[in-house]
Image (cartoon, rainbow, N blue to C red):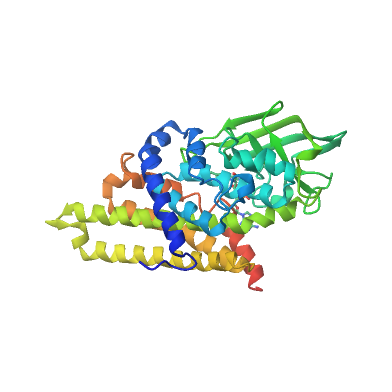
Amino acid sequence: MTPTPPFTDEHEELRASVRGFIERELTPHAEQWERDRWFPDEVFGKLAAQGLLGLKYPLEYGGQGGDYLHDAVLVEELARTGSGGTAAGIGAHVSIATPPIWKFGTEEQKQRYLAPAIRGEKIGALGITEPGAGSDVAALNTRAEPVAGGWIVNGEKTYITNGVRAHFIVTAVKSTSEGGHHGISFLIIDRGEGVSSSKLEKLGWHASDTASISFQDVFVPEQNLLGGLHEGFALIMANFQWERLAMALGAVGAMQLAWERTVAFAHERNTFGRPLAGHQAIRHRLVDLATSAHTCRCVTYDALRRFVAGEEPVREVTMAKLLTQRASFELMDACLQIHGGAGYMREYWVERAARDARLGPIGGGSDEVMREILGRVLGL
Ligand SMILES: Cc1cc2nc3c(=O)[nH]c(=O)nc-3n(C[C@H](O)[C@H](O)[C@H](O)COP(=O)(O)OP(=O)(O)OC[C@H]3O[C@@H](n4cnc5c(N)ncnc54)[C@H](O)[C@@H]3O)c2cc1C
């Protein structure tokens, strides 16, 4: 089949090999990891051995020397684990924790954090959200007080993916007493004295490690300042486009998988003397779902194409995030409905898929925040 732009034959070859690896090494364990509420840290090592934690990073740090399109393949294919939590834990490391170090880090920081992260030896998390600051990022209150040789950090982060297992947390802090847009900085905080985490129970993404992290009088040396002092807001903004694209790609992958599995079920399950797929109402529903999945793919790939071409496609990326996350949840709900009572049972994948998809309209900037951005971009 001809690849859909912006992907080329080379990307499709990568896709086939990534898919094979995921279906062999991750998918068979995903159910157990969901039950355990945890996937093992060794997964990072396995991915690293395939070069998958550094697809877009330069060779000098142990990466594969590729670009965002190679990572896009990985992010979309991770949906094939069938476990949103597993995909999220890997995604947080690859798509949100390490990119700021790559873009804004000093050479020494790249050697100390990025290279071991690519080797799967150090796991990363991005710590921005706080109990009192989610959508309103500028309201964050984790305080970094300057002291000789660095800062003392006090405060609390919440809902942080990889928050228990992470060896380092790329952390947004208030570096002036006023904070806000001109008073936020980023520190790379190592797990150590004064850093404690507690895991949170949640509706979906069970295999992922979502945690509150408390910082109590944590000394952070000055060489761990990431980017410019008080320039952290720009750093937050810099990765939002990729994070949102990654979420859209994840939704596109999950929708495709759910559709394929539901079509298979609709051919197997008989009611009133024929397979479900033989009933016009179900067939039409499946057609609508395929149309929705295709629309989401087109909108996402268009945003991705612009992004890799070096445009600043805020409008297209925001639309892709807004469209795909809600559409994915709606598609999962429709797939669950087609499964009937089975769809409500833990033993069927679709129950989990529906729970997992519910995060999309909240995380990485909620639907309401996307609409606010679009309102501005569209000049409303
Ligand atoms: C499973 C999970 C994993 C996460 N992982 C991470 C992570 O790794 N790192 C990290 O930093 N964060 C992470 N988050 C946090 C996530 O980004 C936030 O939950 C999200 O940005 C929303 O913030 P909030 O929860 O504080 O909601 P709030 O900001 O309190 O918003 C509550 C509701 O009000 C709406 N709302 C807010 N302001 C407005 C407005 N002006 N107009 C209209 N509606 C508005 C919101 O859209 C939302 O529906 C994660 C969250 C979850 C649930």
Residue drawn at x 71%, y 53% as measured from the top left: 235
Q: Which of 103 and 288 is in front in this view?
A: 103
Q: Which residue lies furthest to the right in this view?
A: 148
Q: Position of residue 43 (x, y in %)?
A: 48, 37
In this rendering, the answer to whether 85 lies above or below 308 is above
Q: Can residue 204 be spotted in the picture?
A: no
Residue placed furthest toward the bottom? 379
Percent of width and height locating residue 69:
53, 59
Residue 81 located left or right of residue 182: left
- In the visual, does 117 lie left or right of 337? right
| Residue 378 occupies quadrant | bottom right
Q: Where is residue 360 in the image (x, y as percent from the top left)?
A: 51, 52
Quarter of the image where the N terminus is located: bottom left
In the orientation shown, which residue stands out farthest toward the top?
193
Who's the residue at 66% across and 68% down the image?
A: 376
Count of picture labels: 0
Q: Which of 172 and 188 is in front in this view?
A: 188
Could one spot residue 31 in this view of the protein? yes
Say left or right for 115 vs 228. left
User: The C terminus lies in which quarter of the figure?
Assistant: bottom right
| Residue at 72 percent of width and 42 percent of height | 109
Indicate the position of residue 359 as horizontal and vertical percent values. Answer: 50, 49
Q: Is residue 344 above or below residue 293?
A: above
Query: For the view shown, which residue lies furthest in the front direction?
Result: 60
> Residue 271 lies in what quarter of the image?
bottom left
271, 2: nearer the viewer: 2
